[in-house]
Amino acid sequence: MRTLALSDEILLKIEKPARYIGNEVNSVMKDKCDISIRFAMCFPDVYEIGMSHLGIQILYDMLNRFEDTWCERVYSPWPDLDAVMREKKIPLFALESQEPIKDFDFLGITIQYEMCYTNILQILDLSQIPLLAAERTWEHPIVIGGGPCSYNPEPIADFFDIFYIGEGETQYRSLLNLYQQCRDSGASREAFLAEAAKLPGMYVPRFYEVRYHEDGTIRSFEPTRSDIPKTILKEIVTDVSDTYYPKKPVVPFIKCTQDRVVLEIQRGCIRGCRFCQAGQLYRPVRERDVEMLKDYAVKMLDNTGYDEISLSSLSSSDYSQLEELVNFLIDKCHEKKVNISLPSLRIDAFSLDVMKKVQDVRKSSLTFAPEAGSQRLRNVINKGLTEEVILKGATLAFEGGWNRVKLYFMLGLPTETEEDIRGIAELSNKIAVAYYETVPKEKRSGKVQIVASTSFFIPKPFTPFQWAPQCTKEQFLEKAYMTRRAITEQLNQKSIKYNWHEADASVMEGILARGDRRLCEPILKAYQKGCIFDAWGEYYQHDIWMETFAECGIDTNFYTTRERGLDEIFPWDFIDCGVSKDYLKREWQHALDEQVTPNCQQQCNACGAARFRCGICVSSS
């Protein structure tokens, strides 16, 4: 008999109790007598965010296909329940069984963004698992991290037993088999971790030692055992059509961020934008077979009851079978009265024709991501989007009945000038002008609405911009004010709304993104001082973070505003993401020379990913 971990009294007091009761449609229940491994899969943020993450849905489906394994889910309790659980000493529990996480064999945490690091400690703390990996015994789960932030695991290395580098579908079965063998043979936890460190894609931080120069840069990063690899190559799914994917995704009781069926049509991106980490990490581009996608789309809609399906990809327009897939979905979804969501599309005649069929033009807005205001700076970042293409797309949209446009830009990009910043306002104005020149007065449904939003550039590992300095908070804000002033000078300023991101949080993300092991101490101390849900503006406490860094003797400028030398050893250099450091150096130089690199479909640029012998690296050769 399944008993809820929280009493009715507690559930009635907290916000959205449905976050914690489990038993959703398609959630997996197993008999504990039939399994030997219990795996808790965690997204360290609130339920509505975590339930929207496709990666966890894929791994949840995969692990539960293993007869000997039961994978359950756990998310960060919102602050209201967090306080109750601490007061009443209720251990954090899994949604399916409602049993404590501390009793599981594995706790797998997907790390999607740096600002969730204190939530990882919240999960461990509420689970009554020691925060430091060195203090754990066989009485505690093996804590394993994965996801994009695991490509620089060093700022949180002290808190994890293992990091899984790469795509999760390939090595978990081997890891679980090894775990079972070690438990059955009576091997120590240390012995298990030493064997796990030999598996492809597995990084066990305790077996690696870092030494520093006097200036704080890394002198060496070496394994402490001779039988484990010095460099860890990422794991990759070479055939994304013949692999795990959920036909019955879990359907939440409450509205989530992605409240729809999500169909991943391909992995990777051909574009090579120099600021984009995902575009480098997930190379090479691998497409799913269109017949597989048609089959899964129908089954996922049937098995969930959702009234919307979204095609997921870093650049959906580059999927070679998009027209066939979309036309199939339009026919099927019309029968079922299901909406189709098409993010990451280039705005061209085909895309607009499709969107007119699947969207209410009067209600929807179109999104362009020029990223930079001038063509010069778009060449620096290798955006591959000209002003001509943007204005042509906007004109086609206005002819099709749209009058709302969202524009996304970044401030603080390498080599940025005041002229580049003014270009944001000028491009926004040119789009407004295109509307009034395209749509006759008698056919206009009000004024054109343009929303220009700027985020602040944060250099990330494994990008050509990993050598670039980041702006200070004051520089970021000055650039935002400059943008706002430039917009007020435009002829169509009343049609343009301007938003910008928080500067404090951008600086903090920059510190964590290129951090090293010395950040483990301040992250732990900041958590102990109450920092949690840092990705949520209302909970982020910048002053406490800065105070904590100072107490720990950390100069934050070392991680942000400092330009790196080309020969510097980075904290993440022991990881091989498939893209070579030499290639990234070439791209950094191309950026400084304002030189555009062709995309992967146009030519191979010898990035290094061809060694995986799959995807576009095979089909285009």
Image (cartoon, helix red, strand yellow):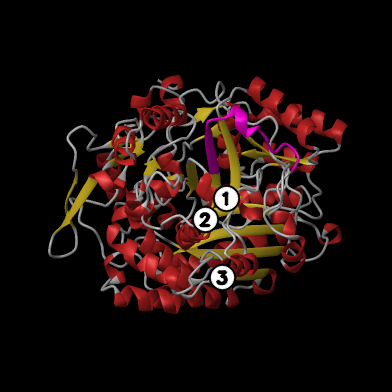
Label 1 and label 2: CA atoms lie apart by: 7 Å
- Image side of residue 549 versus residue 251, left or right: left
Magenta region includes residue 30? yes
- Please state which of the two labelled residues, at mark 2 or mark 3, is closer to the viewer: 2
Magenta region includes residue 3? no
Looking at the image, which is closer to me, 177 or 198?
177
- Please provide percent x and percent y for residue 356: 78, 43
- Image side of residue 536 versus residue 479, left or right: right
Q: Which residue is mark 3?
A: 537
Three-letter residue code for mark 3? Gly
Tally the marks.
3
- The residue at the point 57 percent across, 41 percent down is 56
Q: Which residue is mark 2?
A: 127
| Residue 87 sits above or below residue 252 on the image | below
- Please provide percent x and percent y for residue 205: 30, 47
Q: Which residue is mark 1?
A: 100
| Residue 415 sits above or below residue 181 on the image | below
